[in-house]
Image (cartoon, coloured by chain):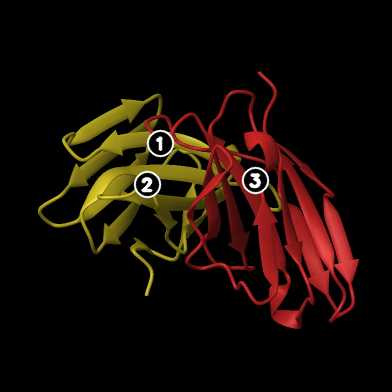
Chain colours: A red, B yellow
């Protein structure tokens, strides 16, 4: 089966610019997650979708980050305006249900550098 | 603070030796998962152990879970240079479906 697809692979932007990341989960996976991983740290959950509804966005900086999952399939994560501390790898993952009985499948991530 | 914390932060061993990594967490969980991350790549799911399980095996991996101590360990037997990676534990919080990752253990296996 195809994995979780993410694009772009890399992105370099200046602070105060905007950027968007795209994720296409595994076909049929109802739950989609966006994680932020800063260098040397573990992934931090930003937002979790169940189909096209938000389950948890408690750690999403809503003044600058937004995410949507139209039609319950692919998803976009946007940052506007970007700050230097947003430099990180943004990982998308999906699972077959809200309870991850089989673990998550991660994409390769988008490495964002804000200069 | 993070839900899960791995110990040690870094581990260097010789090929053929066993590697043990530990994870401690704070709140009740539905399950605990271990992931591997090679440098610059996404995370790969290794094994999931449910809260009512105590031990699980998968190939050269052995995971134990002690819910009374809120801790888990990952043992990699007969390690290989290809096992060099960061290993993360992730806990799915009971009462919700939120999964929180620890900071990881960096394993280096010398050939």
Q: Which mark is residue A100?
A: 1
Residue at 78% in and 64% down: A112
- In the image shown, does B53 or A28 lie closer to the viewer? A28
Say which residue label 2 marks. B97
Q: Secondary structure at mark 1?
A: loop
Respond whether the residues carrying marks 1 and 2 are from the same subunit.
no
Residue at 56% in and 29% down: A29
Dot 3 or dot 2, earlier in sequence: 3
Residue A48 x %, y %? 52, 50
To which chain does the residue with label 3 belong?
A: B
B107 lies above or below A66: above
Report crowding for label 1: few under 14, some 14 to 19, many 20 or more residues within 10 A (C-alpha).
Answer: many
Distance (Cα) linking label 1 and label 2: 8 Å
Q: Which mark is residue A113?
A: none
To which chain does the residue with label 1 belong?
A: A
Residue B95 x %, y %? 26, 50
Q: Are marks 1 and 2 in contact (CB under 8 Å)?
A: yes
Q: Secondary structure at mark 2?
A: loop
Report crowding for label 2: few under 14, some 14 to 19, many 20 or more residues within 10 A (C-alpha).
Answer: some
Q: Secondary structure at mark 3?
A: loop
Residue B78 x %, y %? 42, 34
Is A89 situated left or right of A29 in this image? right
Residue at 37% in and 46% down: B97
Q: Is residue B31 visible?
A: yes
Is B87 situated left or right of B5 in this image? right
- In the image shown, does A32 or B21 lie closer to the viewer? A32
Point out the image quarter for the C terminus of chain A: bottom right
- In the image shown, does B6 or B15 lie closer to the viewer? B6
Residue B21 x %, y %? 36, 53
Say which residue label 3 marks. B42
Point out the image quarter for the N terminus of chain A: top right
B51 lies above or below A28: below
């Amino acid at each position: 089966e195809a994995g979780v697809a993410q694009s772009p692979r890399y992105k370099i932007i200046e602070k105060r610019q905007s950027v968007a990341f795209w994720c296409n989960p595994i076909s049929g996976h109802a739950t989609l997650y966006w994680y932020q991983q800063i260098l040397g740290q573990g992934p931090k959950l930003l937002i979790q979708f169940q189909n096209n509804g938000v389950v948890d966005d408690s750690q999403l900086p809503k003044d600058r980050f937004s995410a949507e999952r139209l039609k319950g399939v692919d998803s976009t994560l946007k940052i506007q305006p970007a700050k230097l501390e947003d430099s990180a790898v943004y990982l998308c993952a999906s699972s077959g249900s809200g309870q991850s009985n089989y673990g998550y499948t991660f994409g390769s991530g988008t490495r964002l550098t804000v200069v | 603070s993070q839900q899960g914390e791995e110990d040690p932060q870094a581990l260097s061993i010789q090929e053929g030796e066993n590697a043990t990594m530990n994870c401690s967490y704070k709140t009740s969980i539905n399950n605990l998962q271990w992931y591997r991350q090679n440098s610059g790549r996404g995370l790969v799911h290794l094994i999931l152990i449910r809260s009512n399980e105590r031990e699980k095996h998968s190939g050269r991996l052995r995971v134990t879970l002690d819910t009374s101590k809120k801790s888990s360990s990952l043992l990699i037997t007969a390690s290989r240079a290809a096992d060099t990676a960061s290993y993360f534990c992730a806990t799915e919080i009971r009462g919700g479906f939120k999964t929180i990752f620890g900071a990881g253990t960096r394993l280096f296996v010398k050939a």
